[in-house]
Image: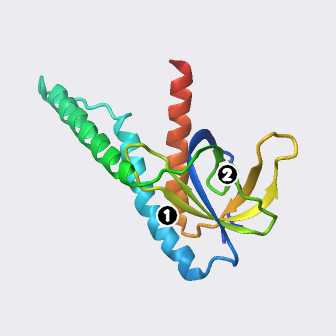
Amino acid sequence: MTDHNPPSVLTFEDRLPVGEKKLEKPFSENQITDLNHSAMDVLSAIISLEQMGFEHVESDVKGVSAEIHRIEQKLDFITELLAKVIQAQQTTPQIKAIKMSADHVIWCSDIQFNPGDFCLLSIHLSQKYPTPLELPVRVKNNCSESRSEPMIEGQILLSDEGVIDDLTRMIFLFHRRQIARHRS
């Protein structure tokens, strides 16, 4: 699927709500297509939300920039309230350690996986956007020998180049946000 792509070196690490579902058989082409479409929607929304925090509006008209900033704050507040209402109606998965690039993911797992197993990961990337990113994953190995908690490494099986580009962009934005957090 994504084996023809060079491995991505840009990663981000975090502790996020992660759901996992072990599958008995490989993903079908239709399932991968549906997951590509779903991922495109989620990634577009999350990228938009992430970029809003980094955009600076410059204006020649005095007060327009301040007014736009106030409107953005109100929209952020409404978005957060709506997300909290939706999250209250859902059960959020357990928060787990995760390290992710555009083609691989390592996560702390409660399930025993073997190399070659297939898994559907649901990663809640943003509190402002309650829909998780669902990733089809093929387990590469179990990296828990040196750790107290079981860690699983898997290859992300998304196949659409646009989705992979958006996933790379999202990882870059998350990576940049983590660097900014450590500086302040």
Q: Secondary structure at mark 2?
A: loop
* Side (left or right) of 140 relative to 63: right
Please give the residue where the numbered disc 2 appears in the rendered image: 8
Q: Secondary structure at mark 1?
A: helix
Residue 23 in picture, x, y percent from top left = 67, 72
Tell me the amino acid under the disc marked 1. Gly
Residue 116 percent coordinates (x, y): 79, 69
- The furthest residue to the right: 145
Q: Quadrant of residue 121?
A: bottom right
Q: For residue 124, which numbered disc appears in the image?
A: none
Figure quadrant of the N terminus: bottom right
Which of the two residues, 146 or 148, is positioned nearer the viewer here?
148
Label 2 crowd (10 A; few <14 / some 14-19 / many >=20): few
**Splitting the image into 4 quarters, where does residue 64 fall?**
top left
- Tell me if residue 169 can be seen: yes
Determine the residue positioned at 61% across, 81% down.
28
Q: CA distance from mark 2 to mark 1?
A: 15 Å
The amino acid marked with disc number 2 is Ser
* Residue at mark 1: 162
| Colour pattern of the rendering | rainbow
Image position of 143 (left or right of 57) = right
Label 1: few (<14), some (14–19) or many (≥20) C-alpha neighbours in 10 Å:
few
Q: Relative to 60, is 99 on the left or the right? A: right
